[in-house]
Amino acid sequence: MKYAIPVQPAEGPAVTQPPAQWAIVDLFGHSRYAGRISEQELAGSSFVRIDIPETDSQPAFSKLFGAAAVYSITFVTETIARALAREYEIRPVETYSIQKLKDRIALTAANHTGRCIRCGVEADNLDAGVCADCVPY
């Protein structure tokens, strides 16, 4: 390990930890991330940490994955990883997840008010908080 970084644990001798490297990480489930990877321990388990760089459309963020979720790791240059991060457009939190949360909160309110969570119209028969005009199917 030519570029190893010494790490001093709380007790005992220093251990050697490889430096973070830029890579493309493929996960089972057909997800692909590009960024700087390293290993991180959390709650007694080891995870692959991916630091996705900032792009024009999103701030930088980090994700942790269990080693069993990783299908492959391809080491690349920083330039390539940054370019692919822009191309992949991975978001830290998907907007549909936020919309689902908003809908769940609104559904609770709709159950009390009798109003559609999409358009706000009063309706006697709300299907999951949505009136017949707003049901997507």
Image (cartoon, grey):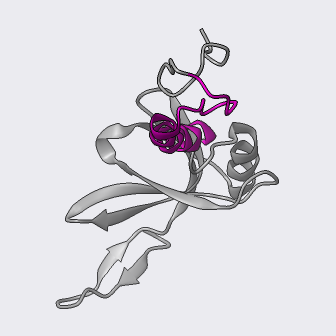
Which of the image's four quarters has the C terminus?
A: top right
Q: Does the magenta stretch include residue 101?
A: yes
Q: Which residue is drawn at 62% across and 28% down?
A: 122
Please tell me which residue lies in front, 15 or 107.
107
Looking at the image, which is closer to me, 111 or 42?
Answer: 111
Label count reads 0
Q: As rendered, which of 37 and 135 lies closer to the eye?
A: 135
Q: Residue at x 31, y 88 (%)?
A: 8
Tell me where residue 104 appears, x and y as whole percent: 47, 39
Q: Where residue 61 appears, x then y in whole percent?
A: 59, 60
**x 47%, y 24%: residue:** 128
Which residue is at the front of the view, 109 or 136? 109
Q: Which residue is drawn at 50% across and 17% down?
A: 125
Residue at the outermost right position: 56
Predominant secondary structure in magenta?
A: helix
Where residue 106 sits: x, y (%)?
53, 41
Q: In which quarter of the image is the N terminus?
A: bottom left
Location of residue 12 in the rendering, given as x and y in whole percent from the top left corner:
17, 89
Quarter where residue 115 is shown:
top right
* Residue 55 magenta: no
Give the side of residue 67 with respect to residue 82, left or right.
left
54 horizontally vs 14: left or right: right
Left or right: 5, with 90 as reference point: left
Q: In which quarter of the image is residue 130?
A: top right
Q: What stretch is highlighted in magenta?
A: 95-123
